[in-house]
Amino acid sequence: MSLTFARCFDPTGAVHGIPTFPWRLAPDGLATRRQLRALGLRPGGQDIVGQVLRPRFRRGPLTAFLYRVDRAKPVRPMTPAKTAALAKANTARRTCPECRRDAGYVIPAQLGMCIPCAYPEGAAP
């Protein structure tokens, strides 16, 4: 099913159930989660007020939900406990389970260990 510009434009919500706009043509005062985050805001429990659709070739359209900027709340600040937990989790992702050293990068999931342990003596694939 091809999704053209005209099928993406439904400001009343008659077809899609909620107001729908083509990609990059949302009205002022509405923003996606990423756009809110860039402004230092979060949806804060408010309901979705619309969506934007971007047609794709041979697949369903990309959908981004819209929220009102005036009802958005500030992002919660990072607490010291959250900062410590995040640092601990990132350290665990960088630590090789074989040699127990910090690899300095996130261990690839396909290998399950650091590159020197996976390919000893330079025996790369």
Image (cartoon, rainbow, N blue to C red):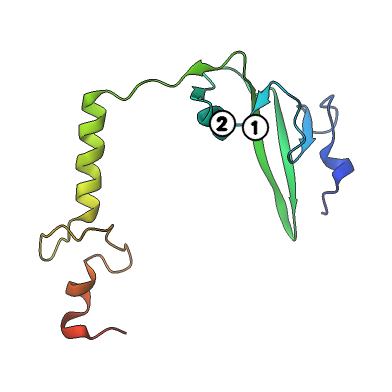
**Res 32 quadrant in image:** top right
Residue most extreme to the right: 6
Instruction: Look at the picture and state if 113 lies above or below 42.
Output: below
Q: On residue 33, which mark appears?
A: 2
Where's the C terminus, which quadrant? bottom left
The amino acid sitting under disc 1 is Phe
User: Tag 2's secondary structure?
Assistant: helix
Relative image position of residue 23 (x, y in whole percent): 74, 41
Q: Nearer the viewer, mark 2 or mark 1?
A: 2
Instruction: Look at the picture and state if 47 lies above or below 55.
Output: above
Gap in Å between the C-alphas at discs 2 and 1?
Answer: 8 Å
* Camera-side residue of 56 and 41: 41
Where's the N terminus, which quadrant? bottom right
Q: Residues within 10 Å of mark 2 (few under 14, many from 20)?
A: some
Q: On residue 93, which mark appears?
A: none
**Res 102 quadrant in image:** bottom left
- The residue pinned by badge 1 equals 65
Number of numbered callouts drawn: 2
* Residue at image coords 83%, 54%: 2
Instruction: Look at the picture and state if 84 lies above or below 122.
Output: above
User: Tag 1's secondary structure?
Assistant: strand
Residue most extreme to the top: 71
* Residue at image coords 23%, 71%: 115
Judged left or right of residue 119, residue 40 is right
* Residue at image coords 58%, 17%: 46
Judged left or right of residue 30, residue 80 is left
Relative image position of residue 96 (x, y in whole percent): 17, 61
* Residue at image coords 44%, 22%: 75
The amino acid sitting under disc 2 is Arg
